[in-house]
Amino acid sequence: MEKVKREQKLGGEIIHITDSNFNDVVGKNPLVLVDFFAEWCMPCRMISPIIEDLASEYSGKVLFGKLNVDENPETAERFQVFSIPTLIIMKSGEEVERIVGFAPKSQIENALKKHLK
């Protein structure tokens, strides 16, 4: 099994998700937000600080992960991610919500709160 890379940002942890560790990371955590992104994507860069803030605010309640679609095309294809950024909220290993494109913090936070109950 691949060692999971962890990134500390503003008190929150963001996991680097790959094709090989996706099922393991998502399956072992009750609520996960996966940010499908690419380095060259400007809206992805714009949403990144929002994800970092939320990772800090929801530390211990939601696991946040980033998956680079250029480096991990199998998972992006499996979830039919055709536009980036795409945020997928997974609950108990199943997709429960998807946000495509840049979204304000309030929209992402409202989506998370719905599934924390």
Image: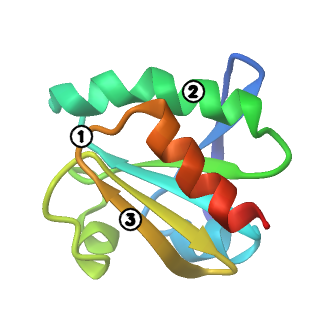
Q: Which residue is mark 2?
A: 52
Residue 98 - label: 3
Q: Say which residue appears at 75% left-offset and 62% top-offset.
A: 116
Q: Say which residue appears at 81% left-offset and 51% top-offset.
A: 61
Measured Cα–Cα span from mark 1 to mark 2: 16 Å
Where 93 falls versus 15 (above or below)?
below
Give the number of the mark in front: 1 or 3. 3
Q: Is residue 107 visible to us here?
A: yes
Where 105 falls versus 28 (above or below)?
above
Q: Are marks 1 and 3 in contact (CB under 8 Å)?
A: no
Q: What's under tag 3, amino acid-wise?
A: Arg
Q: Which badge, 1 or 3, comes first in the chain's sequence?
A: 1
Measuring from the top left, give residue 31's x and y in whole percent: 70, 64
Q: Which quadrant is the N terminus positioned in?
A: bottom right
In this picture, residue 60 sits left or right of residue 16:
right
Residue 38 - label: 1
In this picture, residue 30 sits left or right of residue 50:
right
Circle 2: is it few (<14), some (14-19), or many (20+) Cα within 10 Å?
Answer: some
Colour style of the rendered protein structure: rainbow
